[in-house]
Image (tube, rainbow, N blue to C red):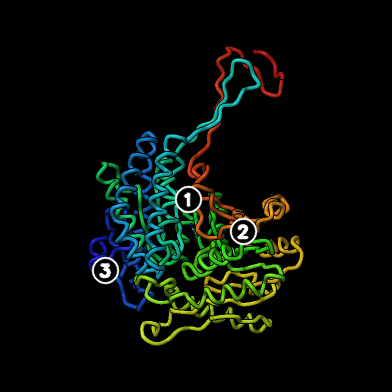
């Protein structure tokens, strides 16, 4: 463990504010990063204080003034080298993600791969920052739009994807000509410091300014609040819970900045009688138990037709029985710990509430004890039979609780699927074209992501990622999401020698 930290440039005590490779002196309270695996303190961080935050923000502004002048494909070349650097550090960074956050190694390395994929995507995109040209209604006029760098961008990320979500934002921001101020979750500050340093070393070696990629570690209410209120940052991208998004969104909008919100989900999978149940069970296992149920895309609800309900239930229970729970660094383990004891408590309280409403616990749900489990962060994933109408089912509990809900007629399944405040991801298992097309139609799923015969989780980076309703409305990562990080400018050039007005207005000739 010590070797991994050392190779990643993490000391025993680290500064919580970095401008590139430059570690600023911080005066904030010391934060301990404890591993959820065994409670061991991995390292300490002196959190950013007000003066450190200001220096970071100023440095990001100064760096932006230089970076915006670098041609976009050249910016892409820096990101290409950043991708190479992460390829070389994949094993170490993956191990640190497992240690600090608790996801299994295969998933942690998958997360680093997601970061690398985003780099590759951004490199290509750096040569494709296209604007339209439009035909002017006036003779001898040319009208077009172009995309300019936006400014320093604030990025707030959650604990569950300690590096990938930063990369969705940061790599596109970089090719767009923006600089980045990253406020990671205080549960995984070391991953952020390590990842930012890997990328910043490349920036440095390429001769670009230190303030392109910056990190500030500190409490959400304070440092997150400062970031959101900082009018030097035109865009604040925030990933996390709905209450966090609401607070950040309000602060950003009150200064008329741009919020880009990717918040909680309450993702459902509909399983219809003609579905391939074996396929469905396999996808549900990964979707519900993967990352110990701590993805915003985790399958939370299964909406299953009455006639196949019991069969699927049995298949799932027998699959759940085979899930090995333990140290996420060990081979064969499929589920590590929850991120901390607070998360375990939230799961326990949700299960209590389900019981009160008359929900049935079908499998699991225990807090495990004995040996490594004694740290208190290990639980058994669980399956419950519930009604969609229970208030607890409408909330996102960030834990491996899978709700099974019965439906009768197909239209009812879609209604149930949409009848929650969130709208992130959704999917259907069916071999009936009419069912899947209805699900994907305007009368179907109301989510930002709607899949057929695959899980709600594990999205590829090439698509636009994000959701509707309380899930925040933002889109990040692939497709045309780069546009959010740029300033769109419409230009009309008059080369006619005359001054005709639009809409045919006559206003007197001089
Ligand atoms: C998140 O949980 O915030 O689709 C993001 C997925 C991942 C991203 C999840 N690619 O599950």
Does the Cβ of the disc 1 residue fall within 8 Å of ligand 1? Answer: yes
- Relative vertical location of residue 350 with respect to residue 477 in this rendering, above or below: below
Q: Nearer the viewer, residue 210 or 358?
A: 358
The residues bearing labels 2 and 3 have C-alpha atoms spaced at a distance of: 45 Å
Which quadrant holds residue 414? bottom right
Badge 2 local density, few (<14 within 10 Å), some, or many (20+)? many
Position of the N terminus, as image quadrant, is bottom left
Residue 362: x, y in percent? 60, 80
Give residue 461's mark.
1
**Residue at the spot 34% in from the left edge and 43% down from the top edge:** 80
Task: Say which label, 1 or 2, has the lower sequence index.
Answer: 2
The residues bearing labels 1 and 2 have C-alpha atoms spaced at a distance of: 18 Å
Q: Seen in the image, is 157 located left or right of residue 34?
A: right
Residue at which label 3 appears:
13
Residue at which label 2 appears:
427
The residues bearing labels 1 and 3 have C-alpha atoms spaced at a distance of: 34 Å
Confirm whether residue 359 shows in the render.
yes
- Relative vertical location of residue 91 with respect to residue 292 in this rendering, above or below: above
């Amino acid at each position: 463990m010590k070797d991994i930290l050392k190779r990643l440039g993490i000391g025993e005590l680290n500064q919580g504010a970095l401008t590139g490779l430059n570690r600023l002196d911080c005066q904030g309270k010391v934060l301990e990063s404890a591993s959820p695996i065994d409670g061991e303190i991995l390292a300490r961080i002196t959190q950013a204080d007000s003066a450190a935050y200001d220096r970071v923000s100023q440095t990001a502004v100064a760096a932006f003034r230089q970076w915006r002048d670098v041609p976009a494909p050249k910016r892409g070349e820096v990101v290409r080298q950043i991708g190479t650097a992460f390829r070389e550090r994949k094993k170490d960074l993956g191990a640190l993600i497992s240690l600090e956050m608790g996801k299994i190694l295969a998933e942690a390395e998958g997360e680093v791969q997601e970061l690398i994929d985003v780099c590759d995507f951004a490199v290509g995109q750096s040569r494709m920052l296209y604007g339209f040209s439009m035909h002017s209604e006036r003779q001898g006029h040319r009208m077009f739009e172009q995309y300019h760098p936006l400014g320093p961008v604030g990025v707030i990320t959650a604990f569950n994807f300690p590096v990938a979500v930063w990369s969705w934002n940061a790599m596109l921001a970089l090719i767009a000509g923006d600089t980045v101020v990253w406020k990671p979750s205080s549960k995984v500050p070391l991953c952020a410091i390590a990842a930012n340093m890997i990328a910043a070393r490349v920036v440095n070696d390429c001769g670009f300014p230190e303030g392109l990629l910056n990190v500030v570690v500190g409490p959400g209410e304070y440092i997150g609040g400062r970031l959101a209120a900082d009018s030097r940052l035109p865009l604040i991208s925030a990933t996390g819970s709905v209450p966090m998004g609401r607070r950040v969104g309000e602060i950003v909008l009150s200064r008329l900045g741009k919020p880009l919100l990717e918040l909680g989900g309450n993702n459902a999978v509909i399983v219809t009688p003609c579905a391939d149940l074996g396929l469905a069970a396999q996808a549900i296992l990964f979707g519900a138990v993967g990352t110990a149920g701590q993805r915003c895309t985790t399958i939370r609800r299964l909406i299953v037709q009455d006639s196949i309900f019991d069969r699927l239930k049995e298949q799932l229970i027998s699959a759940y029985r085979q899930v090995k729970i333990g140290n996420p660094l060990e081979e064969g383990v499929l589920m590590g710990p929850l991120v901390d004891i607070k998360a375990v408590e939230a799961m326990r309280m949700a299960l209590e509430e389900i019981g009160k409403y008359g929900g049935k616990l079908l499998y699991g749900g225990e807090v495990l004890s004995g040996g490594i489990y004694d740290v208190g962060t290990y639980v058994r994933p669980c399956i419950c039979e519930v009604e969609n109408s229970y208030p607890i089912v409408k909330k996102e509990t960030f834990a491996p609780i899978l709700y099974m809900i019965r439906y009768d007629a197909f239209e009812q399944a879609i209604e149930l699927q949409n009848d929650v405040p969130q709208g992130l991801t959704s999917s259907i298992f069916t071999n009936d074209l009419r069912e899947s097309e209805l699900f994907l139609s305007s009368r179907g799923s109301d989510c930002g992501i709607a899949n057929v015969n695959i899980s709600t989780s594990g999205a590829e980076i090439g698509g636009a990622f994000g959701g509707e309703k309380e899930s925040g409305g933002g889109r990040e990562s692939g497709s045309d999401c780069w546009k959010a990080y740029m300033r769109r400018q419409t230009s009309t050039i008059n080369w006619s020698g005359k001054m005709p007005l639009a809409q045919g207005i006559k206003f007197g000739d001089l």
